Image (cartoon, coloured by chain):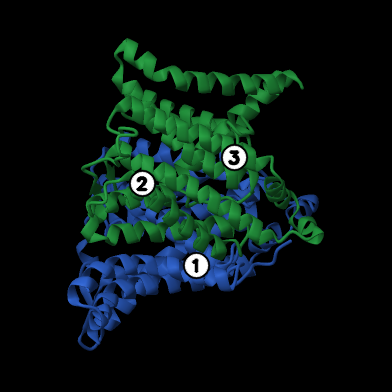
């Protein structure tokens, strides 16, 4: 156990502690915007954590992960529009539909490898994007306004900022714990083994595609949950959520934070979105700085922020 | 019948344009093994350059020449400054870095040219309709695009298959280390190939400029189409890119033109008019999914190491 491990654990602990006390801080300073910003960050962090499960641990680089954000969101939005306001209906449906979508596209996509896999997942996400654009009953291109957030029979009130924030945070931490448990389980080890050497794993007798597919479906479902949260957060869902640049954003968050590290995607999401927010306050042309910054991070900071921390502490 | 001929030509023109874009992408991908998401930005820059240079010089042809040179130069600078350092890295690093470049280019264009799009008027000699078969007129400019793109495709074929540089390019694609060991300046070759790819993307962008509005983000939609094409065609294969580009151009154009009528025959008119636009946008992705499921390496898999 070197200092490297300690530093990374320290960052994780500090991040969680910071996220936990954030509502208090925002209440005391009267900075409501901070809470709004971090609610969004926590939701995207959950999506990034789910992407990291397949991309970082499973070696399945999905370039269409934002599709699940949209599917989860549209499940909530459409049910709300059809007068099924209960979260006990909306959320299970959101998860189920995301899981089914992941099952179908996973079964087809996992026949390919490498760049072809990246592109076929992208193609399916684009299809979902165009389907959503074509649903004129539910807003089509313009998106769908959600007039009432999911209700949970008085158990929790999503319209209350603080309660909603903690629900999102709870889901995020639950997601991280789930990924941690999966990664250290026999199942997770098989999936990671498949990433390193598929032939060898198959020779021992593991059915590669079946393991990968289950992993793919778990990640998709988790991201569908993030989608349901996102729709409730913005009270709005539109096809733009599924556009390929969104999937790119999610990938950037994962890589930025450190792919294949448990907490990397959370750190990545925070850094990426805070930076975006900060830079866009400084200048209208924030991407002018953000773009080259990403390039520099790739050129000089291999393994993302957590990787950098690891190397830094190893000296 | 009239409409069919016209749409067929539109499809051909769009397909050839996509080929220009995809050829550069597949060269860079096949030879340097670099996933370049910023390829669409070069396409956008080509369009902005031509709109600027034509307005500045007052001559359409001169503007095109200058814009072509500018994109070539931009590509070379981009390669030397940034992308050169990414060769041999993980594909994911490429995605992240070039995604950053897209952000950069979009905002730079917004800073320099402003958020509103530009329009590029055609000179009068290119706006006249040309009679191609008796009774069928087709815009001269679109015919010019078809002619130029076909000429470039032919030239590319000759350069890659019949010249020494082309031989080196092909050799570089099949075994990088070996041609370096044989004393070829591989870095220069890579810069050259990247510049060529950038110029092709710029050419596609500048030819498209008078037809569409020149605007920020115009490269992103078409970039995805170009990726779809090189994946369908088989990465690194120019022949594959050509076939796939024509296929995608045709299916996309003809789908948009005729799918609504076809659907109206089976569905109710209201259902058809809502389903048709979404379905026709989906067609090419559907095509790609089907092809990849059937042939996971694309239609013309290039020789792998």
Chain coloured blue here: B
x, y percent for residue A120: 52, 60
Chain coloured green here: A
**Left or right of B164, for residue A96:** left
Return the residue at label 3.
A179
Q: Residue at x 50, y 30 (%)?
A: A293
Q: Nearer the viewer, mark 2 or mark 1?
A: 2
**Are the residues tagged 2 and 3 within 8 Å (C-beta)?**
no
- Residues marked 2 and 3, same chain: yes
Residue B219 visible in the current orientation? no
- Disc 2: which chain? A
Residue A43 visible in the current orientation? yes
Return the residue at label 1.
B289
Q: Crowding near pointer 1: few (<14 within 10 Å), some, many (20+)?
A: many
Q: Secondary structure at mark 3?
A: helix
**Are the residues tagged 1 and 3 within 8 Å (C-beta)?**
no
Whole-angstrom CA distance, mark 2 to mark 1, is: 35 Å
Disc tally is 3
Of mark 2 and mark 3, the one earlier in the sequence is 2
Q: Residue at x 21, y 60 (%)?
A: A137
Q: Nearer the viewer, residue A38 or A315?
A: A38
x, y percent for residue B145: 35, 67
């Amino acid at each position: 156990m070197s200092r490297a491990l300690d530093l990374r654990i320290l960052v994780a602990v500090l991040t969680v502690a910071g996220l936990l006390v954030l509502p208090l801080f925002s209440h005391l300073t009267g900075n409501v915007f901070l809470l709004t910003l971090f609610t969004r960050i926590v939701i995207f962090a959950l999506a990034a954590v789910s992407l990291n499960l397949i991309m970082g641990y499973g070696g399945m680089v999905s370039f269409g992960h934002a599709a699940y954000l949209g599917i989860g969101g549209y499940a909530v939005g459409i049910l709300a529009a059809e007068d099924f306001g209960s979260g006990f209906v909306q959320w299970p449906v959101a998860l189920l539909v995301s899981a089914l979508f992941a099952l179908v596209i996973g079964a087809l996509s996992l026949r390919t490898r490498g760049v072809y896999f990246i592109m076929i997942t992208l193609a399916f996400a684009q299809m979902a994007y165009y389907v959503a654009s074509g649903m004129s009953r539910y807003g089509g291109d313009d998106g769908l306004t959600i007039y009432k957030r999911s209700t949970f029979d008085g158990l929790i009130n999503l319209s209350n900022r603080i309660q909603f924030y903690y629900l999102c945070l709870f889901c995020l931490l639950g997601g991280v714990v789930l990924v941690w448990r999966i990664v250290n389980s026999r199942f997770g080890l098989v999936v990671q083994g498949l990433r390193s050497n598929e032939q060898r794993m198959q020779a021992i007798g593991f059915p590669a595609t079946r393991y990968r597919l289950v992993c793919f479906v778990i990640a998709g479902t988790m991201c569908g949950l993030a989608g349901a949260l996102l729709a409730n957060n913005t009270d709005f869902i539109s096809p733009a959520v599924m556009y390929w640049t969104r999937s790119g954003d999610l990938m950037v968050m994962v890589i930025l934070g450190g792919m294949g590290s448990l907490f990397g995607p959370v750190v990545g999401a925070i850094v990426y979105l805070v930076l975006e927010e900060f830079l866009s306050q400084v200048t209208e042309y924030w991407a002018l700085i953000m773009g080259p910054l990403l390039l520099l991070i790739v050129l000089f900071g291999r393994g993302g922020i957590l990787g950098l921390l690891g190397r830094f502490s190893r000296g | 019948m009239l409409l069919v001929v016209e749409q067929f030509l539109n499809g051909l023109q769009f397909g050839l344009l996509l080929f220009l874009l995809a050829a550069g992408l597949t060269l860079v991908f096949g030879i340097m093994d670099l996933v370049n998401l910023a390829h669409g930005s070069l396409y956008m820059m080509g369009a902005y350059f031509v709109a600027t240079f034509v307005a500045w010089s007052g001559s359409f042809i001169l503007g095109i020449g200058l814009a072509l040179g500018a994109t070539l130069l931009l590509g070379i600078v981009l390669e030397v400054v940034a992308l050169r350092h990414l060769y041999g890295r993980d594909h994911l690093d490429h995605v992240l870095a070039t995604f950053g470049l897209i952000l950069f280019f979009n905002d730079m264009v917004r800073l320099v040219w402003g958020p509103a799009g530009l329009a590029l008027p055609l000179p009068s000699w290119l706006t006249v309709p040309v009679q191609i078969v008796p009774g069928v007129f087709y815009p001269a400019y679109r015919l010019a695009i078809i002619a130029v793109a076909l000429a470039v495709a032919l030239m590319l074929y000759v350069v890659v298959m019949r010249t020494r540089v082309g031989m080196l390019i092909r050799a570089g694609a099949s075994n990088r280390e070996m041609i370096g060991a044989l004393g070829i300046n591989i870095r220069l070759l890579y810069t050259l190939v990247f510049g060529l790819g950038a110029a092709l993307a710029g050419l596609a962008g500048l030819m498209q400029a008078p037809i569409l509005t020149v605007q920020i983000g115009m490269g992103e939609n078409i970039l995805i189409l170009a990726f779809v094409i090189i994946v369908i065609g088989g990465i690194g294969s120019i022949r594959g890119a050509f076939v796939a580009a024509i296929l995608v151009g045709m299916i996309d154009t003809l789908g948009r033109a005729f799918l609504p009528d076809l659907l109206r025959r089976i569905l109710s008119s209201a259902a058809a008019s809502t389903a048709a636009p979404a379905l026709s946008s989906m067609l090419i992705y559907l095509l790609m999914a089907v092809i990849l499921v059937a042939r996971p390496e694309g239609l013309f898999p290039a020789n792998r190491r």
